[in-house]
Amino acid sequence: MTLPIMLVLVWNLSLPAQTVSKGAGSSDPATAAMQVQTDLNRLMRGVFYPPSNVVFSAQNDDPADVKPAPGQDPSMATDPLKSTFGRWQAVENAALALSESANLLLIPDRKCANGFPVPLNSPDWSKFVQSLRDAAMKAYQAAQTKNQDKMVDVAETLSTACASCHRKWRDKPRADRCK
Ligand code: HEC
């Protein structure tokens, strides 16, 4: 019963991506490989913020105790912790998603919301991206131990990794961000 539903979802999700790569007008797989589709702010909201909250939540709420809402189909869950790949595995997956997503911060030609280019050429940018990867991999390892005390430590490291970059490029008037 659950499997066909998931297959339908995966199929639907793949449609926009195909449309996008056709729209780019390139038949060369090498140039189709990486494309920027949004500004840095939307990337943060859509890609980095949701899995961070999954990792952070494991400090206070034991992922092992999370239960799907009564009558809810886990394959349709909007909360990863309550999904088919839920509980501690959701925390592991969120940490891995964050670490892999760090690569998206290195794609050339992305702009910040105010139109400034993402400061890819700054050595600090690379340093902060690497700190994010390292912090996320630490979170992954901690999640594998299913130990909430360890999650408290890695959550601190992760939020420092986010905040260090924000302090330099985000926490200022919008027009001055990413300068
Ligand atoms: C390498 C730098 C860098 C790292 C690391 C980073 N961010 Fe960001 N983030 C930014 C910048 C710069 C902006 C502002 C972008 C813009 O205005 O276009 C931003 C914006 C955001 C926003 C949007 C805020 C709003 O008001 O719309 C969120 C949410 C966010 N970041 C979350 C996170 C989280 C959570 C992490 C850590 C897991 C993280 N970021 C790590 C640079 C970074």
Image: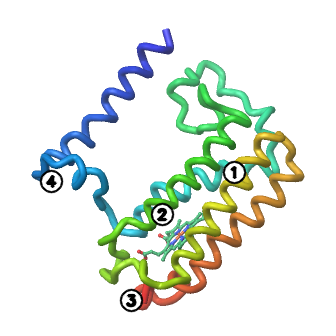
Residue at position x 44%, y 85% in the image: 177
Q: CA distance from mark 4 to mark 3?
A: 30 Å
Query: Tag 3, which secondary structure?
Result: helix
Q: Nearer the viewer, mark 2 or mark 3?
A: 2
Three-letter code, disc 3: Ala
Q: Which residue is mark 3?
A: 175
Three-letter code, disc 2: Met
Query: Tag 4, which secondary structure?
Result: loop
Is 165 positioned to the left or the right of 64 in the image? Answer: left
Three-letter code, disc 4: Ala
Q: Which residue is mark 2?
A: 44
Between residue 15 and residue 103, name the one nearer to us.
103
Residue at position x 69%, y 67% in the image: 159
Q: CA distance from mark 1 to mark 2?
A: 15 Å
Q: CA distance from mark 2 to mark 3?
A: 18 Å
Q: Which residue is mark 1?
A: 55
Q: CA distance from mark 2 to mark 4?
A: 23 Å
Question: Residue 40: which disc?
Answer: none
In this rendering, the answer to whether 39 lies above or below 65 is below
Q: Give the mark, 1 or 3, whose residue is nearer the N terminus.
A: 1
Q: Nearer the viewer, mark 2 or mark 4?
A: 4
Question: Residue 24: which disc?
Answer: 4
Between residue 131 and residue 79, name the one nearer to us.
131
**How far across and how far down the image is residue 56, in percent?**
71, 55
Residue at position x 76%, y 47% in the image: 141
The residue at label 2 has a CB less than 8 Å from ligand 1: yes
Query: Tag 1, which secondary structure?
Result: helix
